[in-house]
Amino acid sequence: MIDFRKALLRAAPALGRGALSFVVALALVALLTTWAGYDAGVLFHTLFAGAAGDGYRISESLLRSIPLVFTGLAVVVSFRAGLWNIGADGQFLAGAMAGTFVALHWNGMAQVLMLPAMFVAAWVAGAFWGWIAVWIRVRREVNEVITTIMLNLIAVQILAWLVHGPLQEQAGAYPQSDAVPAAARLPVLFAGLRLHAGAIIAVVAALLLWLLLFRFAIGLRLRAVGHNPRAARFARVALERYRILAMLLAGALAATGGIVEVSGVTGRLYENLSPGYGFTAIAVALIARLHPIGVLPAAVLFGALDTAARALERDLGVSPVFADIVQAQVILIIILLETPAIRTRLQRALAGVQARMPFRGGEHA
Amino acid sequence: MSTAISLHKIVKNYGPFRALDGVSFEVHSGELHALLGQNGAGKSTLMKILYGLSVPDSGEIRLGDAVLRPGSTKEAISAGLAFVMQHFSLIDSMSVAENLMLGQLKGASYSPRKLIASMQDFIDRNAFELDAAAQVGSLSVGQKQRVEILKALYRNARFIIFDEPTAVLAPHEISVLFATLTALREAGIGIVFISHKLDEVLQVSDRITVLRDGRTITTVNTSEASAAQLARLMVGHLPAPPPARQSADISRSTPVQLAVRDLRVSREDGSPALEEISFELHAGEILGVAGIDGSGQSELAAALYGLISPEQGEVTACVPANRIGLIPQDRDEDGFVFGFSIAENCALDELDMTDAGDWTVLSPQESDRLARERIEALDVHCRGPQQDVAELSGGNRQKLLLARVLARHPRVLIAHNPTWGVDVQATALIRDKLLRQAEAGTAVLLISSDLDEIYRLCDRFFVLFRGRITGWGDRNTERSRVSLWMTGKEEGAA
């Protein structure tokens, strides 16, 4: 059995540090906003009320975090295998496109078949999008950073072509697809709120990935390949096999995010389906210290920031640019404080102060 | 009166573990002060504190009478300190001259030709034999070490700390190093020589400080010290001498476990690493592979373990792959996943040993139990199975690695420099285990650049030079002949 108390105790330092960095980030935001002529108090109130003021706001914040959980998990699994997958965005779109295509093409299917078919299509497409990059890496030693970025661009262009061409709505008015049939929609969790069953899928996905990485041989080998490929090789782990597996899995995870977004929120494809989820996902994954369970709170934090930024814009009339700045600033500061080099320096500085204290009045005073 | 750099009553804790307990140490300019102790005694920790890489919990560091800020490498360097570590901090793709200049460059650009000329001049002035234009990656370990020393001199270091400098060197390189150390001392440089090898310490040092379990046991003048006395101080009690190996003939009658025929392996750049290697490894024998480091030993170990496929010839194993055990030379890079716990490292092995599939469930309790078994089998000092292997001392890592390999119940055991950088007790333990393995019928291949070790343990051996076998010998072979083989003078088999 999993001992939750123990697990919580072990996670306590990380949680504490996370909370501290968040507070520091908010303090700096307060400075900037005061300097820019806003009332920091009102601003913070709007921020918090906007993100978590009532059930609706909480639902919206969680809604925004769902795609970040999936793309964040995709980044976690690939980074754990030592692959710098910058392509979660493209994999997300690949999943959204494939799943939507299935829903629109076989729009008569029963709901029991429809959703599974859409998910399978998304997984295949996302895994394929991930596989291209890792295959080029394994075969030609081309750095996956470059290929995944390029594949993002390609996915965006394919999406644009689809919604302007073959998949454009019958009415032909906007560059978007028709709405998927009702059978293709994920149910909402609470009447009147937009939060949908994708949230449950996201939590399950995080738990499954944690099990896979930390409770199965495949996960140990995958992590060994990422941590020290030389030692993994000496333990007769087939490096390429686990690199490929990691990217297939990453692609499928990000793709799940894509189809969940269409099926749960938008109901259709359009060009800006992803406002860069795959990139924010990297920050999410890093703040989570590449831990699947940590991705959940990290994604919620980012989701809440996003809803809060919209509230600033709507309720205070703050320019959307400024709202973006606030959001980016919080992210930057958290990442900065969580950077290993800075963390050790902080710890060292603290230890240094402690080290000198007892000798202040000592023999050489 | 010469100046001295000194540590006073240093205390350092790692969690509940007290690594240093009020240790004091000093080194004068023009003195070679050896810091003797077993692995885990706290030698490296103490020197890291001196160099500012680690912050002590209490105590102070002084240069003469001035107190240095703890935990500041910058201040240590400006006090004239340099640290030659076991793992060199050199950039392989750059020339010797560029490595020397690195961090010292004034202005935004330099002319490579002028730089090489001036650095060559600097090297010659210090009577080092090195080509300033050579790429560091192409140098031998001993030469790289000399580049590190030159780097220290170029920064006008007045005190140089050497962390186990002989651990990585071939015998003839050790004598070159000792000559260098003597010259440095005469030039007024203070030297700290970290070691656990008694004979070396007695040979080169002026004074010896013995460290045991994080405490200073004593500081003596080398001229008044004896090996037996030092060993007792260092270990607490004398390790038993390894049992003498009986006959050399068991090998002929026992079955062949590993056969190598006309093996040829190339390096990545296409140059030959091994050529025309043929031998048979019998059950119950210890076959030695002697030779200067870098003569193809790593490639041999990798080829026998099945990590690289031969370009020509063949390796035939008469035992299943998971019953072949390997202690790789670079235990930190090849033997461990740093950042993983002891339990995770053991589990990785166990999965290989049992040919476990990807969907094998890892139970934390089971991993912990396995790890505990390994820890207890060879008395590895650690906080428990969940400790990160990176935190273990070198000797303890090597013991853990051996325990993991022995847990395979290997029928072929390949050990590549298994006692490098390992203290007296651990060395005795490792050698004892190898002998016992052979007695129990395991075929042991001992690749070692320590000729004493070869003579002490092996029934027979061959010598590698530039990837070729230059001679075969056994315990009765004259060492002078062997050293000729080690430098490439080929001769008929013994």
Image (tube, rainbow, N blue to C red):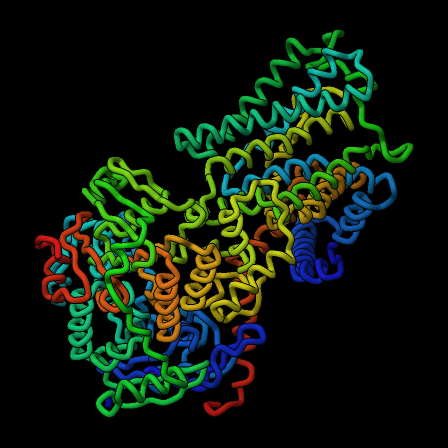
- Left or right, B373 with reference to B229: right
Residue B113 spot, x, y in % from top left: 15, 48
- Left or right, A185 with reference to B201: right
**Of residues A65 and A46, which is closer to you in this image?**
A65
- In the figure, residue B232 lies in which quadrant? bottom left
Q: Residue furthest front?
A: B253
Residue B104 spot, x, y in % from top left: 28, 60
**Of residues B366 and B387, which is closer to you in this image?**
B366
Question: Which residue corresponds to the image point at 61% horizontal and 34% vertical from the top-left?
Answer: A278
Question: Which residue corresponds to the image point at 49% horizontal and 65% vertical from the top-left?
Answer: B391
Residue A283 spot, x, y in % from top left: 60, 44
Quarter of the image where the N terminus of chain B is located: bottom left
Q: Is residue A27 visible?
A: no
- Left or right, A230 with reference to B126: right
- In the figure, residue B165 lies in which quadrant? bottom left
Residue B12 spot, x, y in % from top left: 50, 78
**Of residues B370 and A62, which is closer to you in this image?**
B370
**Of residues B292 and B80, which is closer to you in this image?**
B292
Q: Is residue A327 visible?
A: yes
Question: Which residue corresponds to the image point at 73% horizontal and 54% vertical from the top-left?
Answer: A2
- Left or right, A152 with reference to A185: left
